Image (cartoon, rainbow, N blue to C red):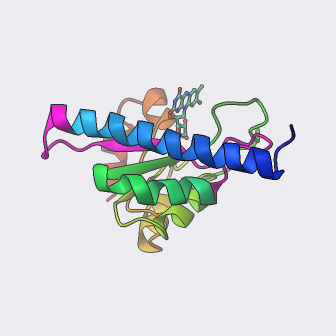
Amino acid sequence: MNYSYPPDEILFLFLYWRGLRFIQEVLGAIRAEVGIDYPVQLRVSASDFSDGGLTPAEVALALTYLEAELDAVHVSSGGLVPAAPLATPEGYQTPYAAMIKQYVQIPVIAVGNIRTQALANFILADQMADLIAIGRPLLEDANYGEKLLALA
Ligand SMILES: Cc1cc2nc3c(=O)[nH]c(=O)nc-3n(C[C@H](O)[C@H](O)[C@H](O)COP(=O)(O)O)c2cc1C
């Protein structure tokens, strides 16, 4: 059965809502454990880049049902299939964060080759995201954060 046919679409919706409920239950259990003052974030792949896989709009819609359990959402992409684009230019995932930010009230974290203070400030000023996450630069240089602060 191919995707985009009614039986598959119904099955997909069924799995989608069941999946949402599963995540809600997991988040509820985490919240019960850590309490109200502990920040709980969810990291999402805005697109898995697979045929018939989740699209950014579907992920954004799902988040509107999950955000009550969350303090922030962290927007990445890829992860499941090797079809993900190899090129990762500066801020390559930020458009996903900006799109998801249109749907949710909670803070949105952008990540993905955000290496300069100028780009980080631009993303924040343009309200594409509320927070910036940095991965590999911190692995490359343990003093990276201090160096950025020194520029401030
Ligand atoms: C080799 C490699 C493995 C990664 N594995 C994961 C992973 O297992 N789970 C995850 O959420 N992100 C994973 N990421 C994504 C990073 O957490 C981060 O989003 C990505 O490196 C982009 O941010 P950066 O450019 O600041 O490093 C991985 C990234 C790289 C380069």
Could you tell whether 68 is left or right of 137 in the image? Answer: left
How many marks on residues? 0
Q: Is the magenta stretch mostly helix, strand or loop?
A: loop
Check the image and report above or below for 129 versus 114: below
Task: Say which residue appears at 36% left-offset and 67% top-offset.
Answer: 105
Q: Nearer the viewer, residue 56 or 87?
A: 56
Task: Say which residue appears at 50% left-offset and 54% top-offset.
Answer: 62
* Image region (quadrant) for ligand 1: top right
Residue 89 in the image: state x and y as whole percent: 68, 50
Looking at the rendering, the stretch of residues picked out in magenta corresponds to 32-56
Residue 45 lies in the magenta-colored region = yes
Quarter of the image for the C terminus: give it.
bottom left
Task: Say which residue appears at 49% left-offset and 28% top-offset.
Answer: 140
Check the image and report above or below for 41 versus 141: below
Q: Which of 131 and 118 is in front in this view?
A: 131
Q: Residue furthest bottom?
A: 126
Quarter of the image for the N terminus: give it.
top right
Residue 125 in the image: state x and y as whole percent: 42, 72
Q: Nearer the viewer, residue 138 or 38?
A: 38
| Any part of residue 118 in sight | yes
Could you tell whether 31 is left or right of 3 in the image? Answer: left
| Any part of residue 70 in sight | no
Residue 88 in the image: state x and y as whole percent: 69, 44
Residue 77 in the image: state x and y as whole percent: 61, 43
